[in-house]
Image (spheres, helix red, strand yellow):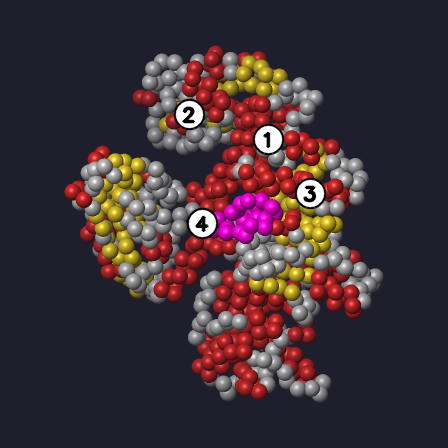
Amino acid sequence: MLDDVTKKKINTLRQILVGKLPDPKAQVEQITNGLIYKFMNDMDEQSVSMGGKSTYFSGKFQKYSWKNLMDTKTSGVEKIKLYSDAIEQMYTNENLPELFREIFKNSFLPFKDPSTLNMFLKEINEFHYSNSETLGDAFEYLLSFMGSQGDAGQFRTPRHIIDFITEIVNPQKNETVLDPACGTAGFLISAYKYILKQNTKKNLGDGLSASDRKKIGENLNGYDISPDMVKMSLVNMYLHKFTNPKINEYDTLSSEDRWNEYYDVILANPPFFSPKGGIMPHNRFGVSSTKAEVLFIDYINEHLKPNGRAGIIVPEGVIFQNGTAYKQLRKNLTNSSLMGIISLPAGVFQPYSGVKTSILILDKNKSKTFNDIFYIEVKNDGYSLNTNRNPISKNDLPELKIIISNFLEGKKIDKKLLVNKETILASEDLMVKAEIFEENQNTQLISMSEVIEVKNGYAFKSADMTEENKKGFLPVLKIGNVSKQGEIKDGFKYHKFNPEFENFLIPNNSIIIAMTGATVGKVAISTEQKLLLNQRVGRIEIKNKEKINNKYLFYLLKSEKFYHYCQTNAVGGAQGNISSEEIAKFMIPLPLIETQNQIVEELDSYQKVIDGCRQVVENYKPSIDIDPTWEKFDFDEVCQINKNKISENKIKLEKNYTYVDISSLNNKTNEIDFSNIIKGADLPSRARRIGNNDDVIFSSVRPNLKAIAYLNDIKENTLFSTGFMILTPKENLLSKFLYYSVCSEYFTTQLVNKMGRGSYPSVNQNDVASTKIYLPTKETQKIVVEEIDKISFVIKGNRDLILQMEEKISNSINKIWSN
């Protein structure tokens, strides 16, 4: 158990380094080097005190001893050189065991400030090797700050989730255990602690013999593709009493060197991130794919012994995506090993990501005799599901662990938690999901008029409305306030409230339908805000709440089926209208109210993920925290503006060109749509600018200047509108740093102040040239870019998750109609 004193020391070390090393990963690496350096000294001192000799700091390495390093006569500059040389040379120290040499491999001191190093070493001096068990817990606490490794798609797995999975899979002292993407070895240490606990009489692990402990050490294996992660896991294992941990730098998905190694137990949370172009796997996988999540799961399933078991954290897409590889994977798992799925809440990986995940439980032996698979949803895991992740009283895990254990032991559990294997294998999508509808359930198809009425709004006169929210006035909900996302959006006008308008007040949670214009058929649901219903906006009133769930109806009406119905049945030319009577004729499936409630609960869980992710995506814009000590330049000093252009006579009339104008650039995601293909003869006169990979573009016309993009996938014959400024960085400027600088408020504020007046205010090339940019050294630029890239990776993950959850809602709604 981590004590507060040790925890405080770790925090102090990070605070000392943060000014020089803002990247948490770099901090962890330097603290790791410092701790191991000090431990080697402690072990030498222990050896000398017992009549032996120094081992690690002997011969030509004696000058690097901790005693010399901490000598008050050693100046700050000398100390920097001594410590820097030591950690760079320690890899060559033949007196060190291979483990320690691996830890120091490629190490260096990234700062040369004597004051920082002195404070750092004084704090390291407070740690002692005699307390290695406490230090093992301290090191795990230190590793928690590494958080998300964006380039590899890794997210730190919470300790309680790791232990939960380990307890279900139940590794034994004589079994081999593998984590094929071990990161910092959290699963392996959890397995070790679990085995100790299972073999305890009075003191932890006292039921194990010396040979048992040696065997356990040999049985625990880890692979990781990252040398940094291998180093961290080696240290972590060492501090948990593993003198020779078996962690190998290995590309699990692309290398065949260890393909013939099989294990009794596999525990993993692999980094489910596929690089551009996908993984390039060898041909021994059971599923053909370039997706990391498919390949890792297939690898784990293939490398279990005949009695093998596994617990794997997977992205939610593995459960429901319809790609060929995903369906083949689900089929293989169902036929060979899958025992159950534990659906985790979306906030488990906060604050690093809102990604939705599940746990797969595999058992190759028991799967042969079990006809059903369990599907269990975790609502609460004992912590709040926001970025703070504070402990809470609600925790489903202990009860679910008992239910799952009972199932694995062949005992009966609630049938609602079970899915029949034959049903899965017979279905087209091969989805493993507890069905909401049962075969014997009588789902009726009825006209909505049986259960609802559509109320019309009032013709509030525009002349009587104001844009100012005055006392005694209420907002009027018009067609334009009905969002395509099923929400009510701002931009209200206000009307004085009189008692005669009482019938046009919109009750909370009312379903609202646009009845006129291009958005006819779009629906939203009202909030607690008091709103007045305008004409041509319909409000649904439920006749019998015991027969239909209002939220269930909302999800049905938010579907493409209802929208298409309204669009098809709208009359009246360009401004189509649909009547209240026509809306009420719409046919809907109506299962039992209990089933509706279950459906709503499921769809609400997806919608909550969408709402949370959308808030993250829509509120984040990449930008740089400027350090005023950085040197300031004009833009034309550090980049070329509109470097390349094409003249009219150089355009080949018969050739196809990709044309990018302002409408091709998504203002919210900064992504470009390259689908606008135009013949040279038909190109507009504005199609004159050429952009290359690593250039940055932004709109010079729009007042908010938020249409910005980083070019990294430009095809031949792509032309950009003259409405864009195209920036090409010079030698001392990283292109990504330029991009994030252009995204920042500091940049856009300068340009807004330079804009001309008129209907389409704009800036010219001279305006951009004289705009200021803060520019640090290239090394600092790289650090800044890496930090923002990590966040951007998380944002992209949230954006992808929105699409996945929207697909889940759509699939669930389609299933309701089919039933």
What amino acid type is highlighted by mark number 1? Glu
Residue at disc 4, secondary structure:
loop
* Residue 428, numbered circle: 1
Of label 1 and label 3, which has the lower sequence position? 3
Quadrant into which the C terminus falls: top right
Q: What's the magenta bit mostly, secondary-structure-wise?
A: loop
Magenta stretch: includes residue 281: yes
Q: Which one is closest to the eye, mark 3 or mark 2?
A: 3
Residue at disc 2, secondary structure:
strand
Residue drawn at x 61%, y 34% as measured from the top left:
430
What amino acid type is highlighted by mark number 2? Leu
Residue at disc 1, secondary structure:
loop
Q: Is residue 787 left or right of residue 335?
A: left
Q: Position of residue 296 (x, y in %)?
A: 59, 50
Q: Which residue is mark 4?
A: 276
Residue drawn at x 66%, y 52% as measured from the top left:
303
Q: Which one is closest to the eye, mark 4 or mark 2?
A: 4
Q: Which residue is mark 3?
A: 336
Tell which residue pokes out farthest to the right in this image. 201
* Cα separation between marks 4 and 2: 45 Å
Q: Which residue is mark 2?
A: 477
What amino acid type is highlighted by mark number 3? Ser
Question: Do the CB atoms of the residues marked 1 and 3 lie less than 8 Å apart?
Answer: no
Residue drawn at x 50%, y 65% as measured from the top left:
26
Residue drawn at x 55%, y 84% as measured from the top left:
61
